[in-house]
Amino acid sequence: MAEIHLSDDHKAFIEDLVKSGAYKNEDEVVAAGLRLLQQKDANLRKLIQEGLDDVEAGRVLSFASSEELTAHIMKMAEERKNAVAPARGIAEGAGRSSRRL
């Protein structure tokens, strides 16, 4: 399998990456893209296995309805938001100007 067909946009993107000096040639660009896909696939498989392991171990939640699930998700989001809010003030420097750069 030596021949592949690319859209004009993909060809231009590859050419731009080579011209920028980020890659020596088109083969390096394609190889880098394939490595990223392999990493993404491996990570996805790992996450799926973690989920399956959780189910097997009984680490699951059951909901009677989609409304109950939605309420649970909203509660978790609110708890996360409240947990992050105090830390945000510390990180930004309490008492400092709120002007952003």
Image (spheres, rainbow, N blue to C red):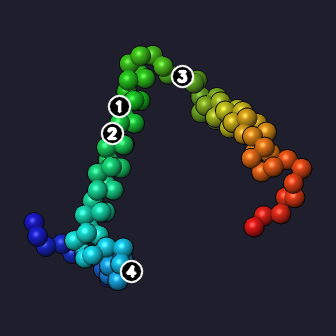
Residue that numbered label 1 is attached to: 49
- Mark 3 lies on a secondary structure that is loop
Residue 75's spot in the image, x, y percent? 70, 32
Residue that numbered label 3 is attached to: 61
* Circle 1/circle 2 CB separation < 8 Å: yes
Residue 58's spot in the image, x, y percent? 45, 16
- Residue drawn at (25%, 64%), measured in percent from left and top? 31
- Mark 2 lies on a secondary structure that is helix
Viewer-proximal residue among 89 and 73? 89
Viewer-proximal residue among 38 and 99? 99
Q: Quadrant of residue 43?
A: top left
Q: Earlier in the sequence, mark 3 or mark 1?
A: 1
Residue that numbered label 4 is attached to: 20
- Mark 4 lies on a secondary structure that is loop
Residue that numbered label 2 is attached to: 45
Q: Earlier in the sequence, mark 4 or mark 3?
A: 4
| Distance CA(mark 4)–CA(mark 2) | 34 Å
| Distance CA(mark 4)–CA(mark 1) | 39 Å
